Image (cartoon, helix red, strand yellow):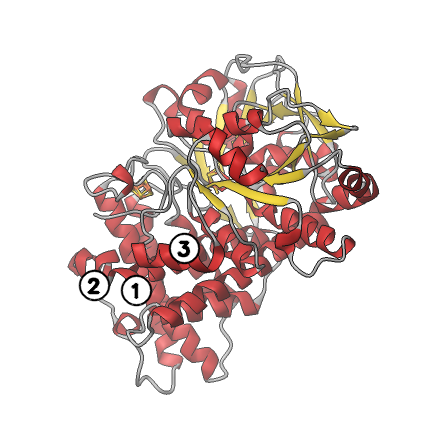
Amino acid sequence: MFCYQCSDALNGKGCTVAGVCGKKADVAEMQDLLIFVTKGISAVTTKLRAEGKPVKARVNHLITLNLFVTITNANFDKESLAARVEQTLKTKAKLLAEVSDKNNLPAAALWSDAKENFDAKKIGIFSTENEDIRSLRELITYGLKGLAAYLYHANALSFDDEKINAFAQATLAKLLDEGLNGDDLTALALETGKFGVDVMALLDKANTETYGNPEVTKVKLGVGKNPAILISGHDLRDLEQLLEQTEGTGVDVYTHGEMLPAHYYPKFKKFKHLIGNYGNAWHLQTTEFEKFNGVILLTTNCLMPPKESYRNRIFTTGAVGYPGCRRVEEVDGKKDFAPLIELAKTCLPPTELETGEIVGGFAHEQVFAVADKVIEAIKSGAIKKFVVMAGCDGRQKSRQYYADFAQALPKDTVILTAGCAKYKYLKLPLGDIGGIPRVLDAGQCNDCYSLALIALKLKEVFGLNDVNKLPLVFNIGWHEQKAHIVLLALLYLGVKNIHLGPVLPAFLSPNVTKILVDNFGIGGITNVADDIKTLIG
Ligand code: FSO
Ligand code: SF4
């Protein structure tokens, strides 16, 4: 195996024997095969579109989920990945029969070998020899995985966009094209960023039209006395169904990790048994899930290999999978959470980890509503700078940097955040500026879209022609591939001088890194004192 798609890549280079994430070699190779066949079917759907033949939503959704299941910390179940390979090959065979002109289709489009007969080296990352082409191809692939994750959530709420599907599939097909050079692929990476903006806009529309605009909300950290279900991941539709089915059963529901921002949506506030948020970011789950005592539902990444002690209380759904953990499948658009509810009733209530509350819900509409106050604070000098510290949290000790950085920031700065990165500083007593909290949480990682809208609004209000002239700096923590699509989206929007940590992606070759540095001013992090000087002055 070889995998270097996340910030945990072994020794900053790549995992070769097994993943630091717990992914076994055979699972990694099955994921490589799934990506290969997904590129193949995408070449076929792209050809069909070119011939004026529509591609069914069912096929688009198959491709989207294929990408999503290969994202870091999502699916560790080789059998379910192998089943997706088989399903993709069968679907591809049917689609191929519809193609009139099969000339010039790449080998992957015609490949139908049984899964036992594949050579991982021929289809995996190193099948591309040139390290810069490889680096750009992987950057785009990972961006598309992130895009697929967000598209999947929009699809779950019955929102879809043919242009995004067509672009993702055409781009996957282009990654098989030996004729594309570094310049072509760099342009394609930026175009992927454009569709990253589009997919986040689509998901924002899906979320806000379905659940209302996020409101500033206090979320409880303590626990109640009832047995409970903890829901983790990003899928709001799963939460909605779980809340409906647990209502009146005596089983409470708590959010975990990236599900925290669900509390900000008006539609979820009416569920009185949605008690609060339990625990912290994903990397602390092995101790926190143990203490939760109840049932845990993983709707998306980040799942860590569960300990024996609580494995029987873990359920997975959607893109997530782990051998031996029970699953909830969707049947006719519905998920039946009855087995979780019955098991939860037999469990002890959660052990309290902390008390108090946190405040969030500063998505675009809420910030626009207090825009006058914010603008006044900037004009008066009460707010000198906004620091975007969105992205991911992770297990590296070096990520303590982000907590220290937040604490060391001057008191006239405001942190804009989204994603699980917030857990490093959301609970710190950083105070407020004239009633504006110094940490404004917009929501999940996909809600970085909100942060982009806020920046564009400020640019408009101040009559600037360049977002980089705003008193706004970026110090982003990344972990997995959703962060890549967010990064590509920010680059597409023209944001420069983004600092990325705690390490630069292992898949960036020296030449590709140079392109990012020279054209976009992307940099890493050093230490808190020096970075405060560089970013804040
Ligand atoms: Fe975090 Fe995991 Fe949302 Fe990621 S829980 S690390 S970028 O999956 O998706 O922020
Ligand atoms: Fe390693 Fe990350 Fe790949 Fe897991 S996802 S195998 S930790 S690089």
Q: How many marks?
A: 3
Q: Which residue is mark 2?
A: 129
Crowd around label 1: few <14 · some 14–19 · many ≥20 (10 Å): many
Q: Amino acid at mark 3?
A: Leu
Circles 1 and 2 in contact, beta carbons < 8 Å: yes
Position of 254 relative to 27 (above/below) = above
Q: Nearer the viewer, residue 219 or 270?
A: 219
Q: Where is residue 334? Give x, y as percent.
A: 57, 46
Alpha carbon separation for disc pair 3 and 2: 23 Å
Q: Where is residue 411? Give x, y as percent.
A: 66, 27
Position of 236 relative to 309 (above/below) = below
Q: Nearer the viewer, residue 322 or 50?
A: 50
Alpha carbon separation for disc pair 3 and 1: 20 Å
Taking the image as shown, residue 383 lies to the left or right of residue 65, namely right
Position of 357 relative to 234 (above/below) = above
Q: Which residue is mark 1?
A: 133
Taking the image as shown, residue 2 lies to the left or right of residue 43, namely left
Is the residue marked 2 within 8 Å of ligand 2, measured from its CB? no
Q: Amino acid at mark 2?
A: Glu
Residue 87's tag is none
Q: Amino acid at mark 1?
A: Ile
Taking the image as shown, residue 201 lies to the left or right of residue 511, namely right
Position of 475 relative to 527 (above/below) = below
Which picture quadrant has residue 129? bottom left
Crowd around label 3: few <14 · some 14–19 · many ≥20 (10 Å): many
Q: Which residue is mark 3?
A: 67
Circles 3 and 1 in contact, beta carbons < 8 Å: no
